[in-house]
Amino acid sequence: MMISIALVEDDKELAHWIRDYLCAKNYNVNIYYDGLQAYQALSVSTPDLIILDGMLPSMDGLEVCKLLRLKSAVPIIMLTARDEEIDEILGLEMGADDYLTKPVRGRLLETRIKSLLRRASPSLSSHVEQDTITLGHLQICKPTRAVTLNNNSLKLSSNEFDILWILAKHAGQVVSRESLYQQLRGYEYDGLDRSIDLRISRLRKKLLDDACEPYKVKTIWGKGYLLAAEVWQ
């Protein structure tokens, strides 16, 4: 079961960026653009973690945090565009567990999320820290960065392993080039860099994929790449 995160943010561009980043990291993210709407929804169904903007329409983020805390101990990360100590103090006094200022950095946000989940629930933490993926005769071990196919060890470069790991986490689903680039490089895709395509090409060769009509690592034109889930038996 995927970790569920509620993202309450009225800046739609930022909200979509955070959602895409976290979805690529295997989280399930629901977005709310309005404070009151979010409070009503989250009062009925509580996610595993909430990312909450401080300034929201209809109901201020601090008030949402305060009211939610009366109902639940769900981990809450507050976001704000203002880098002032008083905002941090207010957020924590309202019951927030952590605090980040904008602009948000994806890797830092993910680190804070993992830290809060470890504290909130060891079972959730173990899910987040998944370290082995098995797809039929394809096995991928993250701690040792070892890959075997039909019991044969594959020699992958660090970059090739990283791409395979991301695709395998989402086997059967399309992963966009933008998402791959962001996870591998830590910043947004500029639309010009073709390093991802070259790594995919090398990875296909090592996975014994068909160079002319790849069926293991498929190119979904205009969308991204997909690691087939059913061809490794």
Image (spheres, rainbow, N blue to C red):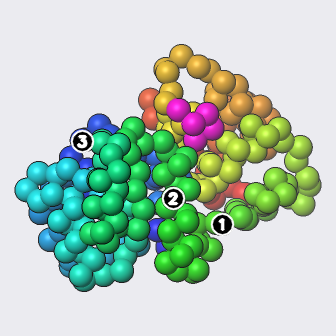
Type of amino acid under label 1: Gln
Type of amino acid under label 2: Arg
Residue 3: give x, y in percent of width and height.
46, 68
Q: Earlier in the sequence, mark 3 or mark 2?
A: 3
How many other residues sit within 10 Å of disc 1, few (<14), some (14-19) or many (≥20)?
few
Q: Which residue is located at x 55 percent, y 65 percent?
A: 115
Residue at the farthest left position = 58
Q: Can residue 90 be seen in this view?
A: yes
Q: Nearer the viewer, mark 3 or mark 2?
A: 2
Task: For marks 3 and 1, give the CA distance.
Answer: 31 Å
Mark 3 — residue? Answer: 11
Q: Which residue is located at x 68 percent, y 51 percent?
A: 165
Considering the numbered disc 2 on the image, is that residue within a helix, a strand or a loop?
Answer: helix
Type of amino acid under label 3: Asp
Residue at the farthest right position = 152
Q: Nearer the viewer, mark 2 or mark 1?
A: 2
How many other residues sit within 10 Å of disc 2, few (<14), some (14-19) or many (≥20)?
some
Q: Earlier in the sequence, mark 2 or mark 1?
A: 2
Q: Earlier in the sequence, mark 3 or mark 1?
A: 3
